[in-house]
Image: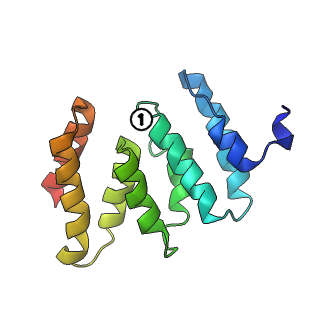
Amino acid sequence: MEDKKMTLKEKLENLVLNEPKDVKKIEAICREIMTIDIPKESLVDLFKVLEKNPHFFFGMPGDPVLTIERYYKEPYYYDLLIQSIKRYPTEYNLWMLQRLMNTFETKDEKEEGLQLFKKILQETEDAELKKTLEGFIAVH
């Protein structure tokens, strides 16, 4: 199938990231997304790329994160982020929650995220994810 005829959803669903040079594939899709206003369903598809590739290095923060965070003021952003974390916690989606929590003004607002961090810390066997979570919990 020719790339230009694929929908954005198909591009994200069919994306295969095996080696560092594959980051160019997601960067190209993110450049495309940045030129349009995408529906929230496409954000879910972009979150799922992070979930399906939990140990892939997208950069810091990387194009997928920058593209998703472009929508952080949308009323549905927080819920989509939490759903992504609950489906499959990764360093990237947890890091996005940490960044969002830094914008919250009260301790109560931060509490749900903090409790989610603690729950995942107890449940995960991923040593790197544990280390990341311990750092996030320590700052709150």
Would you place residue 140 above or below residue 50 in this image? below
Q: Residue at x 35, y 45 (%)?
A: 89
Circle 1 SS class? loop
| Left or right of 10 in this view: 119 | left
Residue 86 placed where, x, y %?
35, 52
Would residue 59 be visible to someone looking at this image?
no
Q: Residue at x 59, y 32 (%)?
A: 23
Q: Nearer the viewer, residue 66 or 127?
A: 127
Would residue 29 be visible to someone looking at this image?
yes
Image colouring? rainbow
Q: Are there few (<14), some (14-19), or many (20+) residues within 10 Å of tag 1?
A: some
Q: Nearer the viewer, residue 44 or 137?
A: 44
Q: Residue at x 26, y 78 (%)?
A: 105
Can you tell which quarter of the image residue 107 is in? bottom left
- Image quarter where the C terminus lies is bottom left
Residue type pointed to by label 1: Pro
| Left or right of 66 in this view: 106 | left
Q: Residue at x 55, y 22 (%)?
A: 18
Residue 36 placed where, x, y %?
74, 61
- Image quarter where the N terminus lies is top right
Residue 69 placed where, x, y %?
50, 60
Q: Which residue is mark 1?
A: 54
Q: Nearer the viewer, residue 53 or 67?
A: 53
Would you place residue 56 above or below residue 18 in this image? below
- How many numbered markers are drawn? 1
